Image (spheres, rainbow, N blue to C red):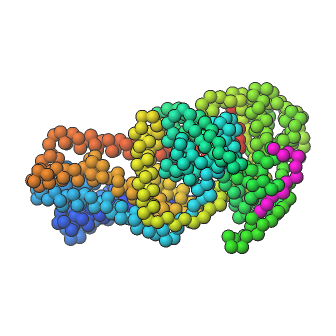
Amino acid sequence: MFFSILKFLGIFLEVVMLFNFVIFFHELGHFLAAKWRGLIVEEFAIWFGKPIWRKKIGGVWFALNSIPFGGYVKLPQLANGDIEGSTEYPAGTVPTAKPLDKIIVAAAGPLFSFLLACIFAVIVWQIGYPMREEASTTVVGFVVPDSPAEKAGIKARDKIVSIDGIPVKRWIGQGNDAIMWRVVRSEGDTVPVVVIRDGKELKLDTAPTRPEKTILTRRKTRELGIAPATTPFISKVDPKSPAADAGLLPRDFITHVNGQELVTPLGISNYLEEHPSEELELTIERGTKNNTKILKVPFRPNLPIIGHIVPDSPAERVGLKKNDVVLSIDGKPLKSSTALLKYVQGQKKEPMKFIVERDGKALPEITVTPAEAKQDEGGTRPRIGIAFDDKFGITYDPYGKGDTRHPGPEEQIRASATAIFNTFGAVTSSKSDLSIQHLGGPVMMMRVYYLLFEQTDGWKLALWFSVVLNVNLALMNLLPIPPLDGSHITFATIAALKGRPEAADELANSKPVQWFVTAGTMLILGFMLYVTFFDLQDVFGGRKSDKFPYADKAQAEAPAK
C-alpha cells in the first residue's frame, strides 16, 4: 500500500511538472516577445491563486502562486486587457502599442507552443516511442458474441482492409486510416467493412451500435464489438495453477495452441470452446528479441471458476458463490468461461441446472433462471449475474507485444494537426454521433499523461503526446475568440488596416465589442467547465475505459436487474 501511494505521488508529480511546463513555455513566448518589442510587462506568474513567492525584478513582478496549474503574463497594452490575467494599470495610463507589436506578442504564445512541439518531435524521432501491437494491426483478434460485428459475419483473424470505403492501416488513432476512428466517425445506419479472409476479399455490411443521447454522462461512441489481434503476453503466473504446472513464466508470449495462432488473451478459452475434448499444447516464445527460444508445453486447464456474483442477481438468490467451480450445466461439462457464457446466453429464460464444487465437495444440483438485464448498447438480454475467473493462473500484460517507432518530426506534426481537424469536423457535423461532450479539457489531458507514465517507457509516450498537445494548444489559441490569442491578433490587424494604432483600443473598448469579449470569455469558461464535468466522471469512475468497450461482456455476465 505504501509503495503504491509513493508510485502514485511520483507519477502525479511527473504529470504536473510536464503539463505545467507546456503551459509555461507558451507564456514564455508572450513574455519574451513583449520584452523584445518594448511592451510593458506587469507580471509573469507561474500557477494561479495567491502567491507563495513574489518579487519585483527589473520592473516586472515574478510570482510563484499556490494553485499548481498553468500561468499567465500581465500585458496592460494589449487590447481589452492582457492576454491572461487582469491588470492593475488604469485604462489610458499606458502608451498605445503599435499593431505589429501587438500581433507579434499575441502570436508568440502559439508560436512557442509550436516550437516546443517541434522540439519534442525531434526528441521522439531520435529516441523513439513504444508502439503496441494492437495499435498498429488491422487484424481482428476477438468478436463479441451477438455484437454488430458478429451479426455482419466478421470473424477473428479477418484482416480489415477498409471501413466505409476508406482504406485503414492501423487500429488506434484519430487519423482517417485508423479502424476505431472510422467506426466512431461513421454516420450512416449501415457501414460497409471490407475484410480479407483465407485470401479472399469480402464486403460485409455492419450496423454499429448507436449511442443513446445523454445529458449528465458522456455518451459512448459507436461500436462494432471487435478487438484488435494481440499476442498474449504473460506478466504474472500464479503458483499452483495450470500455468505454473505447465512451466509458463512471466514475459513469455503464447503464440499458438495446438498449432492454431492465438490473436487474443481469450484464445485458450475460445479454443477449448470449439475443441472441448482435445489435449492442449501451447507454443511459447521465451527470451529476448535477439535470443528467442520456441518451446512447446502441454497445458491442462482447470474448470471455470466463478470470480464474481452480482448482488441481488438470480445467481446470488439461489446460493451460488464466488470461487465455486462449475462442474457442469444441464449435465454438460464446459471447460472454458466462453463456452459457459455462450451456453447461458443460448438458454434465454430457460432454467439451468448447475453442478458446482465448493471447498472440494460437489454440491447438490442448483437451478438458476435468467432474468432480463439492460444492455449498455440498448435493449435487454437474459443474465444470471456471474463473472467467470478463467485466467488459468495467468495475468496478461494489457499492452502486449510492441515495437519502437521513430516517426520523423514532420510526420508527427502533420498527424497531430490532422487529428485536431478530424475531431473538429466530427464534432461540427450534424450527422455525427460525436459532440462537444466528447472533447476533453485540462483534466483529461493530465489523466492521459498519468496513464502514459504508468506504462513501461511511459515517459517516451508522454513526450509523443506532448507533440499532440502543443500543436493543439497552438492552433486553438489562434481562434479569434476572446480571451484567446487570436482575438488580440484580430484587433491589432484591424488597427493596422485603419492605419491608426489606437484603433485597436477604441474598437476593444466599444460597447458591442465589450459584449462580444464578455460573451467569448463566458463561452470559453463555459466550455471548460462543461468538458471538465465529464472529464471528472472519467477520473472517478463515471465511465469505463474505451480501450475495449466490450471487454466485460467478453469475459463476464452483466448484472441482472
Q: Residue furthest front?
A: 200
The x, y position of residue 36, in whole percent, is: 21, 68
Q: Tell me, yes or no, if residue 532 can be seen here.
A: no
Residue found 86% across the figure and 59% down from its top: 298
- Quadrant where the C terminus lies? top right
Q: How many marks?
A: 0
Q: Is residue 85 above or below residue 459?
A: above
Residue found 70% across the figure and 38% down from its top: 145
Q: Is residue 134 left or right of residue 327?
A: left
Q: Is residue 208 above or below residue 180?
A: above
The x, y position of residue 88, in whole percent, is: 19, 55
Q: Is residue 252 above or below residue 190?
A: below
Span of residues in magenta? 274-284
Judging depth in this view, the residue of 464 and 95 nearest the camera is: 464
Judging depth in this view, the residue of 5 and 120 nearest the camera is: 120
Residue found 65% across the figure and 28% down from its top: 380
Q: Residue furthest bottom?
A: 291
Q: Tell me, yes or no, if residue 382 can be seen here.
A: yes
The x, y position of residue 79, in whole percent, is: 18, 52
